[in-house]
């Protein structure tokens, strides 16, 4: 069983949780050994637009996950100064795929995971990411081994695709991503 | 004030509600006279992957909305045979923009809104849509005046963009859609 955790928090950007959630869940149509959970620190977290999302576990589940996906949103700014929060993570980039959307990279940096690496982030978070000593690249996806950062909401398609390919191969990635393409522009059904 | 309703129901496809929800909400960053609500028939509806989403009003709100956006998912199949449900809608395509993602077009057809028109839908719903006498086009977006159908999840970007442009013009559309593009591939911040 492969375990995927999507990390949410208060004031998350809706699309940065739900697009990854939907895409990762599509894998289950072709591979039953695939478990996806949205995790946080409370019973539910509320998005920046006011959507209340029940959590399916706590952030400690990340510590044994195969893929740890940090979402994004204004809420990240508070978390990167919250040592109690950060200490709950015991991640291992040698064994786990660790990745982030947009300002989620700030959490990766605060956890020390981007030490010596370059990364990408949403334009409004560039200076804060640089303040952690991270070289920021003006790219949609930056990959260093098991660590990947993506930025600009729709870059989630490439980031999730990248994660799926690393674990299940290019064919499954292609099937999942093709299932959300527009009709006449690459759509193929896996449902 | 412009009012936008996104119609959800049990077994909705996550991305088909949440992508539109996030995009439509971005308009509020540049125009405060813009109200977006997810509406249904219960206190909450549960997506096909098990996400519980609180409703912000009932489907009757669609009857006075400027944009009525029908989402998609396996749940549509039950609704198109539910006359009590269908009778709650009193839509007017002369005054309202009425649109659908993927199998949401089946509800438009069941409401008689696609009479004499062509439309698009998800491949798995083509035969059911044809059974309503609708000519199905193999396109991502089909527009007839105030009625628009789109298919393939990511076609929501064009569909929502189309709706925004019809009410607020091409500049606002461009700003909203640019705000979700990948870094280095057209991203511009409105936040």
Image (cartoon, coloured by chain):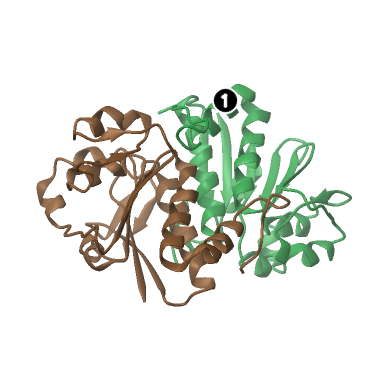
Chain colours: A green, B brown
Q: Secondary structure at mark 1?
A: helix
Q: Which residue is mark 1?
A: A172
> Seen in the image, is A173 located left or right of residue B128?
right
Rendered position, B126 above or below A45: above
Q: x, y percentage for residue B103?
A: 32, 39
The answer to which image quadrant residue B167 occupies is bottom left
Q: Nearer the viewer, residue B52 or B21?
A: B21
Which quadrant: the N terminus of chain A? top right
Instruction: Name the residue at 80% across, 54% down.
Output: A112
Q: Chain of mark 1?
A: A
Q: x, y percentage for residue B184?
A: 73, 51
Instruction: Name the residue at 86% across, 48% down.
Output: A117
Q: Is residue A92 among the parts visible in the rendering? A: no
Circle count: 1
The answer to which image quadrant residue A135 occupies is bottom right
Instruction: Name the residue at 37% across, 29% down.
Output: B123
Rendered position, A17 above or below A76: above
């Amino acid at each position: 069983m492969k375990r995927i955790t999507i990390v949410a928090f208060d004031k998350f950007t809706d699309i940065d949780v739900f697009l990854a959630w939907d895409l990762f869940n599509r894998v289950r149509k072709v591979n039953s050994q695939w478990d996806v959970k949205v995790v946080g620190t409370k019973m539910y977290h509320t998005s920046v637009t006011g959507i209340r999302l029940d959590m399916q576990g706590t952030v400690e589940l990340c510590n044994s996950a195969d893929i740890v996906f940090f979402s994004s949103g204004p809420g990240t700014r508070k978390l990167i100064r919250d040592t109690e929060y950060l200490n709950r993570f015991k991640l291992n980039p040698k064994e786990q795929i660790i990745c982030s959307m947009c300002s989620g990279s700030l959490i990766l940096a605060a956890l020390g995971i981007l030490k010596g690496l370059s990364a990408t982030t949403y334009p409004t978070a560039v200076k804060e990411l640089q303040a952690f000593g991270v070289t920021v690249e003006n790219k949609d996806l930056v990959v260093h081994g098991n660590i990947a950062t993506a930025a600009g909401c729709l870059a989630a398609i490439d980031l999730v695709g990248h994660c799926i390919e690393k674990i299940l191969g290019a064919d499954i990635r292609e099937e999942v991503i093709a299932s959300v393409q527009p009709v006449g522009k690459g759509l193929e059904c896996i449902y």
